[in-house]
Amino acid sequence: MTKYFVLRPHAVLSSYDSLQRFGEDNVVIVPMAVIDEINSFKDLSLEKEKIRRKVLRYLRSALSEGVLTDTGYQQENGSILKIVTNYNDCKIDIPNVTEYQRRTLQVCKGLQNEGHKVTLVTNNVALQIKAYKIGINAEEFKDEIFPVLEEQYTGRIEIEVSPDVINKMYSEHSVDIVEIPCFPEYEWYENCYVIMRCGDTTAYGKVHGSRIDKISVNREPYGVKPMNDGQRLLMDALFDDSQLVVVKGSAGTGKTLVSLASALARYDDGDFKKIIVTRHVRNDKLGYLPGTVDEKVSPFLQGIKDNLDVLINGDEVEGKPRIKAKKNKANFYGEDDKWGQSESGEYFFEKGIIKPQALEIIQGRSILKTLFIIDEAQNIEPEETKPIVTRAAKGAKFIFLGDPSQVENPKLSERYNALVFLTERMKGDTDCTVVTLKDEESVRSRLARVASKLL
């Protein structure tokens, strides 16, 4: 039976081709009230504004193709698209709904009265409940590129192998994927990490084409020693040639500390001319702060600065120094400029080694020979990633850090955010490496690990 999907604004503006994301046997309904509502939106992000303009142009171009008629307009994917303006006489006796919502529910009810199987597509839970109350099926917008947390690509495979395989990895530094007995059970994406274990012996590799090449896990940038498998893989990703690194991990897994240490080490080696750090900050939080846009962002980078403090002053975990203090070592600028003169992470900002950057003004820039760290990326909307990553010029590297389960942006969820979008869209690309640090790899206290799971 043909299904009728009635879309609310979130679904319509989810992507440039949102109206063609439904199966060929289905009918996609956009109420005129939803178009009016979309037109009324203010303060959309630049990328969301682009989507709005393109979708509205697409709807306008379909006017001559019968999108306003009873038969509708057949789209390239085979589905039928309709703009609906009638069903004003359907009674909707539900309080506390906007006029736009009421008109959408009227369309749903009218189509249902005609015998059609109707589904209202909205991420507004309150509206879903109200729709169910009057007998209308309602679902959130589902996109195949946004899997649930447990099914998201992790960028790592852990397997048990034979002694022959482990010996070959150490002697020849590479094995063919087909030499792994269980290889048909996995999807082997380019740049995927492979942890191979045989008894007490472990080998770390990375997928390149049809082979798994051994990687080095002995780096200690700025004295940071990797404490687990996840941190070893992350260090490799930060030093490899990938221009895009997506790092997912819960609080305390060390993703920010390891990223900063590696970034500074590569800066000292001359791989990059500068390091830029940023994070998503809502415009309403920026507005009242004094200074330039970049200066407004700086107070929200305290987590970055705390990790830089650790790099300067050292840290202790379970009584053992995890990072050796480097107060007496001359830094990149010369013997007279020593870290001991500044005991704060502000040092790196004062020297211009690290610069804060507001995401709002990145568009139009060309990021050349720069390492760009985007922290708390789970709070960035998926469509905002394109104007960031497309700024990459020669020698640039982008590192997106975050925890998909710790979303603070009310528009997003653990499956619908920039981290997941980049992971699923870019997996397998030669310029992208994905690293996931597991919850059990957290190096914080037991209380922090338990709280991350239970609270």
Image (cartoon, rainbow, N blue to C red):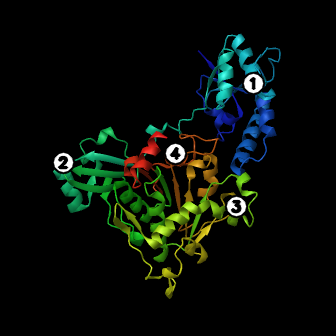
Camera-nearest label, 2 or 1: 1
Seen in the picture, residue 124 relative to 281 is either above or below; the reply is above
Residue under circle 1?
104
Judge by depth and name the residue closer to the eye, 383 or 233.
233
Q: Is mark 1 on a helix, strand or loop?
A: helix
Going from N to C along the chain, the mark reached first, 4 or 1, is: 1
Q: What distance separates the C-alpha of mark 2 from that of mark 3?
A: 52 Å
Which mark, by number, is residue 162? 2
Query: Residue 383 location, x and y as percent?
Result: 63, 47
Would residue 427 be found to the left or right of residue 225 on screen? right
Q: Is mark 3 on a helix, strand or loop?
A: helix
Q: What distance separates the C-alpha of mark 2 from that of mark 1?
A: 60 Å
Seen in the picture, residue 107 relative to 48 is either above or below; the reply is above
Task: Specify the amino acid type for callout 1.
Answer: Thr
- Dividing the picture into quadrants, the one containing residue 119 is top right
Task: Specify the amino acid type for callout 2.
Answer: Ser
- Regarding residue 180, the answer to whether it shows in the image is yes
Would residue 314 be found to the left or right of residue 358 on screen? left
CB under 8 Å between callouts 1 and 3?
A: no
- Regarding residue 192, the answer to whether it shows in the image is no
Q: Quadrant of the N terminus?
A: top right
Task: Specify the amino acid type for callout 4.
Answer: Pro
Camera-nearest label, 4 or 2: 4
Residue under circle 4?
404
Going from N to C along the chain, the mark reached first, 1 or 3, is: 1
Residue under circle 3?
361
Q: What element carries label 2?
A: loop
Q: What distance separates the C-alpha of mark 4 from that of mark 3?
A: 25 Å
Judge by depth and name the residue closer to the eye, 143 or 122.
122
